[in-house]
Image (spheres, rainbow, N blue to C red):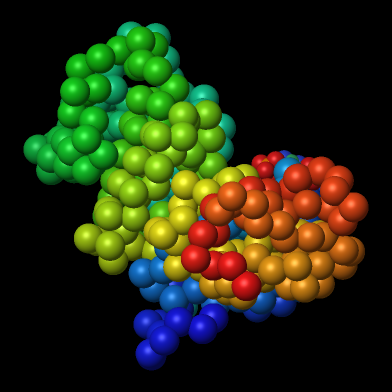
Amino acid sequence: MTQQGKAPPAILEARDLSILRDGRRVLDSVSFSIPQGRFVAVLGGNGAGKTTLFRAILGLDTPSHGSLHVSGHTTQPGRSAIGYMPQSRQMVAGQISGWHMVASALRGQRWGLPWHTPQARAQVNAALAAVDAQELAARPVASLSGGERQRLLLAQSLLDSPRLLLLDEPLASLDPARMRQTARRIHDLARQRNLTVLISTHDINPLEGFMDSVLYLAHGKALLGSVDEVMTTPALSALYGAPVEVVRAQGRLFVVAEGGGDTLHACDCTGHAH
Ligand SMILES: Nc1ncnc2c1ncn2[C@@H]1O[C@H](COP(=O)(O)OP(=O)(O)OP(=O)(O)O)[C@@H](O)[C@H]1O
């Protein structure tokens, strides 16, 4: 990391972290340190291990080797300081209201108890207000658009005053304007609350101007740094262990397999060109 000045203490620290899934090494001796308050884009192709990393941070997957600490503590399930927006958009549908859907994620209330304390109600209302979703509170979830449901999921992740937000592809299936709007909303919330945000995505274009760092996962390895440090042909070729090319066109940045093969990622990196 090359951010200027004294870095705040690390909220997330991986040391030689390896994680197996079905016997396959998804993360292989990965080390990185993320200071509190950073807004980090987590990039990597399908199956690179983004969700696996999030699950490990939540304490749902145990490292096979190495260590992973959140605020200096070993990861464990149920830490209230972590807000999570899962990639799976499955949610209780039917006639449940937006308000009750958000409330169902309150700690200890996961099965939607029919009553809530005034404090719990205030927390749900505040989370809805934080994402400008008050008008969705009374609507049946089944009647909401995909983008509106995603706003409710973001509200859920804000319950219980998290210090760290893990957002697994929160921009997926949004139109370009809403991607940018959502990225700005998350960024502003993070700044107001001094939250650390890890946001996984296949297109970092909408995050341009908001992210402090990129954590790029490929072939079990990870590279953390600024956009300028990570999104370069030499850096990503070294990470992939194979030649890839970082191409800039019309203010956008693409990562392509050498020889003009598949586009691996796209990102608007105006102002980051080398
Ligand atoms: N429940 C599971 N059991 C066994 N293997 C799994 C399981 N979930 C994921 N994997 C494997 O772990 C690897 C990493 O998957 P992961 O979901 O972390 O990738 P990802 O970077 O989030 O991918 P995507 O961008 O497609 O969501 C993949 O090879 C996947 O097949």
Instruction: Give the x, y percent position of residue 53.
Output: 63, 57
Q: Tell me: residue 40, above or below residue 140.
A: below
Instruction: Give the x, y percent position of residue 188.
Output: 28, 55
Whether residue 69 appears in this view of the structure is no
Instruction: Give the x, y percent position of residue 130.
Output: 22, 43
Residue at the image position 34 percent from the left and 49 percent from the top: 184
Q: In the depicted view, which residue is nearer to us: 57 or 148?
A: 148
Q: How many marks?
A: 0
In the rendered image, which quarter contains the C terminus? bottom right
Residue at the image position 78 percent from the left and 52 percent from the top: 256
Q: Tell me: residue 89, above or below residue 206.
A: above
Seen as rendered, the residue at the extreme bottom is 6
Q: Is residue 170 left or right of residue 112?
A: right
Q: Is residue 196 left or right of residue 139?
A: right
- The quadrant in which residue 163 appears is bottom left
Instruction: Give the x, y percent position of residue 3.
Output: 45, 82
Seen as rendered, the residue at the extreme left is 118
- The quadrant in which residue 102 appears is top left
In the rendered image, which quarter contains the N terminus? bottom right
- The quadrant in which residue 195 appears is bottom left
Q: Tell me: residue 63, above or below residue 165.
A: below
Residue at the image position 65 percent from the left and 57 percent from the top: 248
Q: Is residue 192 left or right of residue 50?
A: left
Whether residue 168 appears in this view of the structure is yes
Q: Is residue 62 left or right of residue 152?
A: right
Residue at the image position 85 percent from the left and 48 percent from the top: 260
